[in-house]
Image (cartoon, rainbow, N blue to C red):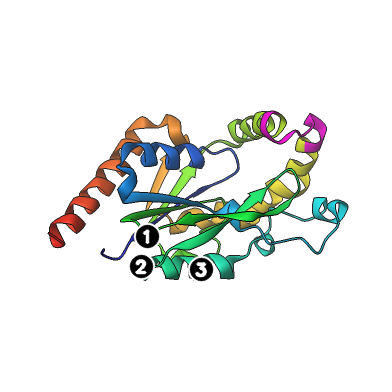
């Protein structure tokens, strides 16, 4: 198989980047594409107590094990499978099980901090920034964290004001300048997603033609 194409999809919390990644994934044959979530690479915190884990600033680059992610991306580029960590937000830590990811023609790396790291940024062939208004993003985050992660409204708002918003302004918003493509309003921007899917399909056809 030829060298995989790495596509980074980023944006602030609740921007719709996961929806964009999912829309692309569903539009292509599963044999051609894989998704890696940056959230899976939060650092292992087995050495910390549950209370200490809750105090971690998950909206800072230091919260991520980028060395492991970079190592895994290099393996995939070299045709090797990886064992991707699985992160459990209910315990703020990885679980023992992992998920096997095989090399594919297209590999999407999705996460709010992927363009902040220069080493990761330089590995990406296509960089996408999903740009959504802050009021829409906070509402989406409140709904997600309450319904999917068992959080209270008060805790979501406190975290947003103390770490999420400052982290966005310091580490995420400035990375928009590195994007090759900016998609306003995330997965609801069907035209933007369709254009990206069309580009990816053309890349796959070119790669298949080379190796016939």
Residue 70 is tagged as 3
Q: Can residue 122 be seen in this view?
A: no
Residue closer to the observer: 196 or 42: 42
Give the x, y percent position of residue 67. Answer: 58, 70
Whether label 1 touches label 3, CB < 8 Å: no
Local crowd at mark 1 within 10 Å, few (<14), some, or many (≥20)?
many
- Cα distance between the residues tagged 1 and 3: 14 Å
The answer to which quarter of the image holds residue 73 is bottom left
Point out the frontmost of discs 3 and 2. 2
Badge 2 marks a residue whose secondary structure is: loop
Q: Is residue 109 visible?
A: yes
Left or right of residue 8: residue 153? right
Residue ID for mark 1: 103
Point out the stretch of residues depicted in magenta: 147-155
Q: Which residue lies at the image location 78% right of the left edge and 47% below the top edge? A: 162
Whether label 2 touches label 1, CB < 8 Å: yes
- Badge 3 or badge 2: first in the primary sequence: 3
Relative height, residue 116 to residue 112 (above, below): below
Relative height, residue 94 to residue 28 (above, below): below
- Cα distance between the residues tagged 3 and 2: 14 Å
Residue ID for mark 2: 79
């Amino acid at each position: 198989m030829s060298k995989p194409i790495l596509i980074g999809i980023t944006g602030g919390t609740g921007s719709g980047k996961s929806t964009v990644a999912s829309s692309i994934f569903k539009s292509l044959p599963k044999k051609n594409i894989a998704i890696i979530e940056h959230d899976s690479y939060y650092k292992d915190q087995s050495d910390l107590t549950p209370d200490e884990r809750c105090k971690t600033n998950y909206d800072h680059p230091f919260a991520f094990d980028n060395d492991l992610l970079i190592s895994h991306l290099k393996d995939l580029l070299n045709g090797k499978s990886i064992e991707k960590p699985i992160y459990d937000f209910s315990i703020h830590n990885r679980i023992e099980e992992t998920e096997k990811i095989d090399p594919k023609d297209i590999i999407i790396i999705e996460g709010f901090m992927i363009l902040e790291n220069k080493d990761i940024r330089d590995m990406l062939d296509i960089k996408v920034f999903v740009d959504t208004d802050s009021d829409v993003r906070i509402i989406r985050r409140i709904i997600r964290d309450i319904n999917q992660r068992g959080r209270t409204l008060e805790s979501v708002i406190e975290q947003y004001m103390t770490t999420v918003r400052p982290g966005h302004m310091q580490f995420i918003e400035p990375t928009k300048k590195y994007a090759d493509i900016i998609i306003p309003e995330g997965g609801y921007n069907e035209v933007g997603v369709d254009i990206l899917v069309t580009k990816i399909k053309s890349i796959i056809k070119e790669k298949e033609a080379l190796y016939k």
